[in-house]
Image (spheres, helix red, strand yellow):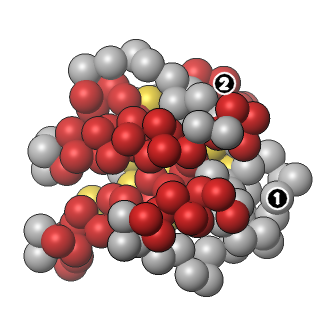
Amino acid sequence: MVKILFVCHGNICRSPMAEYVMKKLVKDAGREDEFEIASAATSREEIGNPVYPPARSELAKHGISCKGHAARQMTRGDYDYYDWLVAMEPYNIRNMLRITGGDPEGKVCLLMSFAGSDEAIDDPWYTGRFAEVYGQIEKGCRAMMGKF
């Protein structure tokens, strides 16, 4: 089983979008039993909150539900549990490494690296570009699926 944790700053926009996009791709491929997919934040400020409404709306436009999501913070134990810890931008990686104490197994990476890019996925909470972010996330997740 491939265990993936998507990570962003607050776990209310990008990382849950990636979680639910990837879950849909896995389900559509009939491979749900091969993956465990979740998401988390590097910060504590949104713990317990649902997906941010514009992000939730963008997912819904693509037939994806994120009902029941509650933001949580990444832990050191997540590093041991998950095979992949996938960040949205370099700033997330810096904070992830602070939480984990390093990346000795090479599990931490950017989502867009699977699509052959070092492109950061900017936080739509600040930019308002939820459709653009959805497109980047879908591209990254499709490329990631291609690796498994």
* Residue 17 x, y percent position in the rendering: 50, 56
Residue at 56 percent across and 65 percent down: it is 57
Which numbered marker is on residue 46? Answer: 1
Q: Amino acid at mark 2?
A: Tyr
Give the quarter of the figure containing the N terminus. Answer: bottom left
Residue position marked by numbered label 2 in the rendering: 91
Q: Position of residue 26 (x, y in %)?
A: 22, 66
Counting residues from the start of the chain, the first of labels 1 and 2 encountered is 1
Where residue 92 appears, x then y in whole percent?
Answer: 64, 32
Residue at (25%, 20%) from the top-left corner?
A: 116
Residue at image position (82%, 58%) is: 46
Identify the amino acid type marked 1: Glu
Residue 70 location (% of width, % of height):
69, 73
- The image quadrant that residue 64 belongs to is bottom left
Q: Report the side of 25 relative to 101 (left or right).
A: left
For the residue pair 132 and 108, the one nearer the viewer reads as 132
Is residue 79 found left or right of 53 in the rendered image?
left
Q: In the displayed structure, would residue 54 be above or below residue 90?
A: below
130 versus 51 height, above or below: above
Look at the numbered disc 2 and give the secondary structure of its residue: helix
